[in-house]
Image: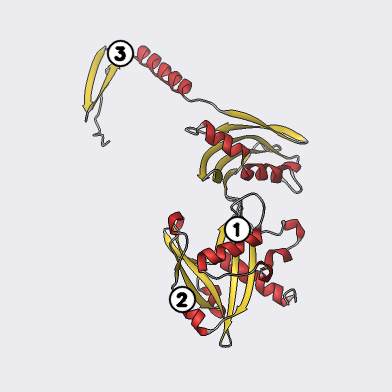
Amino acid sequence: MAVRARTLVFLPALSTRLSIRLNRATISVITTTSRKCKLLSVRMASSQSAATSSLTRTVALPGFAPVQVVAGPGLSEPDFSNAIDCSLFKQWLKNMHGEKGILTNERIGLKEVQIQGVDMFGSRVGFLKFKADIIDKETGAKIPGIVFSRGPAVAMLILLESGGQTYAVLTEQVRVPVGKFILELPAGMLDDDQGDFVGTAVREVEEETGLKLKVEDMVNLTSFLDHTTRQGVFPSPGGCDEDLRFFLYRGKVDEETLKMLQGKETGLREHGELIKVYVVPYSKLWRATSDAKVLCAIALYEMAKKEGLLS
Protein backbone atom coordinates (compact mmCIF):
# COMPACT_ATOMS: atom_id res chain seq x y z
CA MET A 1 0.00 0.00 0.00
CA ALA A 2 1.41 3.37 -1.00
CA VAL A 3 1.49 5.76 1.97
CA ARG A 4 1.81 9.51 1.53
CA ALA A 5 4.18 11.07 4.05
CA ARG A 6 2.61 13.55 6.48
CA THR A 7 4.20 15.74 9.12
CA LEU A 8 2.61 15.80 12.58
CA VAL A 9 3.45 18.57 15.05
CA PHE A 10 2.88 17.66 18.70
CA LEU A 11 2.15 20.32 21.29
CA PRO A 12 3.28 18.74 24.59
CA ALA A 13 1.40 21.19 26.82
CA LEU A 14 -1.96 20.54 25.17
CA SER A 15 -4.27 17.59 24.84
CA THR A 16 -5.26 17.18 21.19
CA ARG A 17 -6.82 14.42 19.12
CA LEU A 18 -5.74 14.22 15.48
CA SER A 19 -7.14 11.95 12.80
CA ILE A 20 -5.49 11.46 9.38
CA ARG A 21 -6.70 9.31 6.51
CA LEU A 22 -4.19 7.19 4.57
CA ASN A 23 -5.94 5.61 1.57
CA ARG A 24 -8.64 3.44 3.18
CA ALA A 25 -7.13 3.24 6.66
CA THR A 26 -7.73 5.84 9.37
CA ILE A 27 -5.02 6.33 11.99
CA SER A 28 -5.88 8.12 15.23
CA VAL A 29 -3.07 9.87 17.06
CA ILE A 30 -3.44 11.06 20.64
CA THR A 31 -1.11 13.76 21.94
CA THR A 32 -1.09 14.88 25.55
CA THR A 33 1.43 16.23 28.05
CA SER A 34 5.11 15.23 27.83
CA ARG A 35 4.78 12.91 30.83
CA LYS A 36 1.78 11.10 29.37
CA CYS A 37 3.46 10.80 25.94
CA LYS A 38 6.38 8.99 27.55
CA LEU A 39 3.99 6.68 29.39
CA LEU A 40 2.23 5.87 26.11
CA SER A 41 5.57 5.04 24.44
CA VAL A 42 6.52 2.66 27.25
CA ARG A 43 3.19 0.86 27.04
CA MET A 44 3.50 0.48 23.27
CA ALA A 45 7.00 -0.96 23.57
CA SER A 46 5.82 -3.40 26.23
CA SER A 47 2.93 -4.63 24.11
CA GLN A 48 5.25 -5.13 21.10
CA SER A 49 7.64 -7.20 23.20
CA ALA A 50 4.79 -9.33 24.49
CA ALA A 51 3.56 -9.93 20.94
CA THR A 52 6.95 -11.39 19.90
CA SER A 53 7.03 -15.07 20.84
CA SER A 54 10.39 -16.37 22.03
CA LEU A 55 11.23 -19.89 20.84
CA THR A 56 14.25 -21.36 22.60
CA ARG A 57 15.89 -24.73 22.95
CA THR A 58 18.99 -25.87 24.81
CA VAL A 59 21.34 -28.17 22.90
CA ALA A 60 23.82 -30.33 24.77
CA LEU A 61 27.42 -30.58 23.52
CA PRO A 62 29.42 -33.52 24.97
CA GLY A 63 32.22 -32.16 27.12
CA PHE A 64 31.15 -28.53 26.69
CA ALA A 65 28.60 -26.15 28.16
CA PRO A 66 25.09 -26.46 26.68
CA VAL A 67 24.20 -24.01 23.92
CA GLN A 68 21.01 -21.98 23.88
CA VAL A 69 19.37 -21.76 20.46
CA VAL A 70 16.75 -19.06 19.87
CA ALA A 71 14.44 -18.19 16.99
CA GLY A 72 14.92 -14.92 15.17
CA PRO A 73 12.05 -12.48 14.55
CA GLY A 74 9.28 -13.91 12.41
CA LEU A 75 10.59 -17.49 12.39
CA SER A 76 7.80 -20.04 12.72
CA GLU A 77 7.89 -22.88 15.24
CA PRO A 78 8.01 -25.59 12.50
CA ASP A 79 10.93 -23.86 10.77
CA PHE A 80 12.71 -23.46 14.11
CA SER A 81 12.34 -27.17 14.89
CA ASN A 82 13.37 -28.19 11.37
CA ALA A 83 16.48 -26.02 11.62
CA ILE A 84 17.70 -27.50 14.92
CA ASP A 85 16.98 -31.07 13.87
CA CYS A 86 18.46 -30.86 10.36
CA SER A 87 21.80 -32.42 9.39
CA LEU A 88 23.24 -29.02 8.40
CA PHE A 89 22.96 -27.65 11.94
CA LYS A 90 24.02 -30.91 13.58
CA GLN A 91 27.14 -31.09 11.39
CA TRP A 92 28.02 -27.49 12.25
CA LEU A 93 27.79 -28.26 15.98
CA LYS A 94 29.88 -31.40 15.44
CA ASN A 95 32.55 -29.36 13.66
CA MET A 96 32.53 -26.78 16.46
CA HIS A 97 33.45 -29.25 19.19
CA GLY A 98 35.20 -31.93 17.11
CA GLU A 99 38.85 -32.35 16.20
CA LYS A 100 40.37 -28.92 15.53
CA GLY A 101 36.95 -27.42 16.32
CA ILE A 102 36.65 -23.82 17.46
CA LEU A 103 35.36 -24.76 20.91
CA THR A 104 38.27 -27.12 21.61
CA ASN A 105 40.33 -23.95 22.00
CA GLU A 106 39.35 -22.93 25.53
CA ARG A 107 39.90 -19.29 24.65
CA ILE A 108 36.73 -19.24 22.50
CA GLY A 109 33.19 -19.55 23.82
CA LEU A 110 29.78 -20.02 22.21
CA LYS A 111 27.05 -18.18 24.10
CA GLU A 112 24.01 -18.44 21.86
CA VAL A 113 22.80 -19.25 18.34
CA GLN A 114 19.97 -17.39 16.64
CA ILE A 115 18.20 -19.14 13.77
CA GLN A 116 17.30 -16.43 11.26
CA GLY A 117 16.01 -18.16 8.15
CA VAL A 118 15.13 -21.57 6.71
CA ASP A 119 14.54 -22.60 3.09
CA MET A 120 12.91 -25.98 2.65
CA PHE A 121 13.63 -28.20 -0.35
CA GLY A 122 10.52 -30.36 -0.17
CA SER A 123 10.62 -32.09 3.21
CA ARG A 124 14.26 -31.30 4.01
CA VAL A 125 16.14 -28.15 4.93
CA GLY A 126 18.04 -26.90 1.88
CA PHE A 127 19.47 -23.59 3.10
CA LEU A 128 19.87 -22.42 6.69
CA LYS A 129 20.84 -18.95 7.92
CA PHE A 130 21.88 -18.39 11.53
CA LYS A 131 24.07 -16.21 13.73
CA ALA A 132 26.40 -17.60 16.39
CA ASP A 133 27.39 -15.44 19.37
CA ILE A 134 31.11 -16.31 19.52
CA ILE A 135 33.32 -14.64 22.13
CA ASP A 136 37.06 -14.36 22.61
CA LYS A 137 37.21 -15.00 26.35
CA GLU A 138 40.53 -13.18 26.84
CA THR A 139 39.44 -9.88 25.28
CA GLY A 140 35.65 -10.17 25.41
CA ALA A 141 35.52 -9.26 21.72
CA LYS A 142 32.92 -10.82 19.44
CA ILE A 143 34.12 -13.00 16.56
CA PRO A 144 32.13 -12.79 13.29
CA GLY A 145 29.59 -15.59 13.43
CA ILE A 146 27.07 -15.15 10.60
CA VAL A 147 26.56 -18.50 8.84
CA PHE A 148 24.90 -19.42 5.57
CA SER A 149 24.64 -23.20 5.67
CA ARG A 150 24.12 -25.33 2.57
CA GLY A 151 26.30 -28.34 3.33
CA PRO A 152 28.18 -30.77 1.06
CA ALA A 153 28.25 -30.56 -2.73
CA VAL A 154 30.13 -31.94 -5.72
CA ALA A 155 31.74 -30.47 -8.84
CA MET A 156 32.95 -32.39 -11.90
CA LEU A 157 35.88 -31.69 -14.22
CA ILE A 158 34.96 -33.51 -17.44
CA LEU A 159 37.80 -33.71 -19.96
CA LEU A 160 37.03 -35.06 -23.43
CA GLU A 161 39.76 -35.82 -25.94
CA SER A 162 38.95 -35.39 -29.62
CA GLY A 163 41.18 -34.90 -32.64
CA GLY A 164 44.32 -34.74 -30.52
CA GLN A 165 42.98 -31.90 -28.34
CA THR A 166 41.43 -31.97 -24.86
CA TYR A 167 38.20 -30.11 -24.10
CA ALA A 168 36.42 -29.29 -20.85
CA VAL A 169 32.63 -29.39 -20.45
CA LEU A 170 31.04 -26.36 -18.80
CA THR A 171 27.47 -25.31 -18.05
CA GLU A 172 26.07 -21.79 -18.28
CA GLN A 173 23.59 -21.12 -15.49
CA VAL A 174 21.47 -18.27 -14.16
CA ARG A 175 23.05 -17.08 -10.90
CA VAL A 176 20.74 -14.60 -9.20
CA PRO A 177 23.10 -13.72 -6.28
CA VAL A 178 25.60 -12.16 -8.72
CA GLY A 179 22.97 -11.14 -11.29
CA LYS A 180 24.74 -12.87 -14.17
CA PHE A 181 24.93 -15.93 -16.37
CA ILE A 182 28.02 -17.85 -15.23
CA LEU A 183 30.05 -20.56 -16.98
CA GLU A 184 30.71 -23.27 -14.40
CA LEU A 185 31.70 -26.84 -13.85
CA PRO A 186 28.71 -29.18 -13.63
CA ALA A 187 27.93 -29.27 -9.91
CA GLY A 188 25.21 -29.97 -7.37
CA MET A 189 24.26 -30.37 -3.73
CA LEU A 190 23.79 -33.73 -2.05
CA ASP A 191 20.11 -34.63 -1.97
CA ASP A 192 20.25 -36.51 1.35
CA ASP A 193 22.38 -37.20 4.41
CA GLN A 194 23.93 -40.42 3.11
CA GLY A 195 27.12 -38.80 1.83
CA ASP A 196 26.97 -40.38 -1.63
CA PHE A 197 29.32 -37.93 -3.33
CA VAL A 198 30.27 -39.94 -6.40
CA GLY A 199 26.68 -41.05 -7.03
CA THR A 200 25.56 -37.42 -6.83
CA ALA A 201 28.34 -36.43 -9.23
CA VAL A 202 27.26 -38.94 -11.89
CA ARG A 203 23.60 -37.94 -11.50
CA GLU A 204 24.34 -34.20 -11.76
CA VAL A 205 26.45 -34.71 -14.90
CA GLU A 206 23.58 -36.49 -16.62
CA GLU A 207 21.01 -33.88 -15.54
CA GLU A 208 23.14 -30.90 -16.55
CA THR A 209 24.93 -32.17 -19.66
CA GLY A 210 23.12 -35.31 -20.83
CA LEU A 211 26.34 -37.35 -20.56
CA LYS A 212 25.91 -40.75 -18.91
CA LEU A 213 29.02 -41.62 -16.95
CA LYS A 214 29.89 -44.63 -14.81
CA VAL A 215 30.70 -44.38 -11.12
CA GLU A 216 33.83 -46.48 -11.54
CA ASP A 217 35.23 -44.02 -14.11
CA MET A 218 35.12 -41.04 -11.72
CA VAL A 219 38.30 -39.97 -9.90
CA ASN A 220 37.93 -38.13 -6.59
CA LEU A 221 40.50 -35.33 -6.85
CA THR A 222 39.87 -34.15 -3.29
CA SER A 223 40.83 -37.60 -1.96
CA PHE A 224 44.45 -36.60 -2.63
CA LEU A 225 44.26 -33.83 -0.01
CA ASP A 226 45.64 -34.38 3.48
CA HIS A 227 43.20 -36.16 5.80
CA THR A 228 43.20 -33.17 8.17
CA THR A 229 41.27 -31.22 5.50
CA ARG A 230 38.44 -33.77 5.70
CA GLN A 231 39.33 -34.10 2.00
CA GLY A 232 36.94 -31.38 0.99
CA VAL A 233 37.24 -27.78 -0.21
CA PHE A 234 35.59 -24.81 1.51
CA PRO A 235 35.20 -22.12 -1.20
CA SER A 236 34.04 -19.35 1.15
CA PRO A 237 34.51 -20.37 4.82
CA GLY A 238 34.15 -16.80 6.06
CA GLY A 239 30.40 -16.96 5.54
CA CYS A 240 29.36 -20.34 4.15
CA ASP A 241 29.88 -23.97 5.21
CA GLU A 242 29.69 -25.40 1.66
CA ASP A 243 31.99 -28.44 1.49
CA LEU A 244 32.94 -29.36 -2.09
CA ARG A 245 34.26 -32.65 -3.45
CA PHE A 246 35.85 -32.49 -6.91
CA PHE A 247 35.66 -35.38 -9.36
CA LEU A 248 37.49 -35.96 -12.63
CA TYR A 249 36.33 -37.83 -15.73
CA ARG A 250 38.55 -38.35 -18.78
CA GLY A 251 37.30 -39.90 -21.99
CA LYS A 252 37.52 -39.85 -25.77
CA VAL A 253 34.73 -38.69 -28.09
CA ASP A 254 34.29 -38.00 -31.78
CA GLU A 255 33.86 -34.55 -33.30
CA GLU A 256 30.13 -35.09 -33.73
CA THR A 257 29.67 -35.52 -29.97
CA LEU A 258 31.44 -32.21 -29.31
CA LYS A 259 29.16 -30.45 -31.80
CA MET A 260 26.11 -32.03 -30.17
CA LEU A 261 27.18 -30.77 -26.72
CA GLN A 262 27.98 -27.20 -27.79
CA GLY A 263 25.02 -24.97 -26.84
CA LYS A 264 22.80 -27.88 -25.77
CA GLU A 265 19.93 -26.85 -23.47
CA THR A 266 19.54 -29.08 -20.42
CA GLY A 267 18.54 -29.00 -16.74
CA LEU A 268 15.40 -29.73 -14.77
CA ARG A 269 13.12 -26.98 -16.06
CA GLU A 270 10.48 -27.69 -13.41
CA HIS A 271 13.14 -26.85 -10.79
CA GLY A 272 14.04 -23.57 -12.47
CA GLU A 273 17.22 -24.87 -14.10
CA LEU A 274 17.94 -23.04 -17.37
CA ILE A 275 21.22 -24.61 -18.42
CA LYS A 276 23.29 -24.49 -21.59
CA VAL A 277 26.30 -26.73 -22.21
CA TYR A 278 29.54 -25.36 -23.64
CA VAL A 279 32.78 -27.08 -24.64
CA VAL A 280 36.03 -25.15 -24.09
CA PRO A 281 39.61 -26.18 -24.97
CA TYR A 282 41.27 -27.21 -21.74
CA SER A 283 44.29 -25.01 -22.48
CA LYS A 284 42.01 -21.95 -22.33
CA LEU A 285 39.83 -23.11 -19.44
CA TRP A 286 41.63 -21.24 -16.64
CA ARG A 287 40.84 -17.86 -18.20
CA ALA A 288 37.40 -18.68 -19.64
CA THR A 289 35.33 -18.12 -16.49
CA SER A 290 35.30 -16.55 -13.02
CA ASP A 291 33.88 -19.73 -11.45
CA ALA A 292 36.05 -20.66 -8.45
CA LYS A 293 35.17 -24.34 -8.92
CA VAL A 294 36.90 -24.32 -12.30
CA LEU A 295 40.11 -22.85 -10.89
CA CYS A 296 40.12 -25.23 -7.91
CA ALA A 297 39.61 -28.24 -10.19
CA ILE A 298 42.45 -27.17 -12.49
CA ALA A 299 44.81 -26.78 -9.52
CA LEU A 300 43.90 -30.19 -8.08
CA TYR A 301 44.16 -31.89 -11.47
CA GLU A 302 47.50 -30.34 -12.44
CA MET A 303 49.11 -31.03 -9.06
CA ALA A 304 47.84 -34.62 -9.03
CA LYS A 305 49.36 -35.12 -12.51
CA LYS A 306 52.62 -33.50 -11.43
CA GLU A 307 52.98 -35.84 -8.46
CA GLY A 308 52.04 -38.93 -10.48
CA LEU A 309 48.81 -39.61 -8.63
CA LEU A 310 46.77 -40.15 -11.80
CA SER A 311 47.15 -43.22 -13.97
The label shown at residue 54 is none
Which residue is at a point 63% across and 56% down the rendered structure image? 234
- Tag 3 secondary structure: loop
- Tag 1 secondary structure: loop
Report x, y in % for residue 247.
64, 66
Q: Residues within 10 Å of mark 3 (few under 14, many from 20)?
A: some
Report x, y in % for residue 121.
52, 47
Residue receiving disc 2: 262
First reached walking from the N terminus: tag 1 or tag 2: 1
Residue receiving disc 3: 32
Residue receiving disc 1: 235
Compared to residue 81, the image places residue 186 above or below, namely below
Which residue is at a point 66% across and 42% down the rendered structure image? 90
Q: Quadrant of residue 139?
A: top right
In this rendering, the label closer to the viewer, 1 or 2: 2
Compared to residue 21, the image places residue 99 above or below, namely below
Compared to residue 75, the image places residue 268 above or below, namely below
First reached walking from the N terminus: tag 3 or tag 2: 3
1 and 2 marks in contact (CB < 8 Å) = no
Which residue is at a point 71% across and 73% down the rendered structure image? 304
Q: Residues within 10 Å of mark 2 (few under 14, many from 20)?
A: some
Say what amino acid the circle numbered 1 marks.
Answer: Pro
In this rendering, the label closer to the viewer, 1 or 3: 1
Say what amino acid the circle numbered 2 marks.
Answer: Gln
**Nearer the observer, 221 or 188:** 188
Relative to 57, is 102 on the left or the right? Answer: right
Asked if one can make out residue 268 in the rendered structure from this viewpoint, the answer is yes
Relative to 217, is 175 on the left or the right? Answer: left
Report x, y in % for residue 207.
52, 63
Measured Cα–Cα span from mark 1 to mark 3: 58 Å
Q: What colouring method underlies this structural image?
A: secondary structure
Measured Cα–Cα span from mark 3 to mark 2: 74 Å
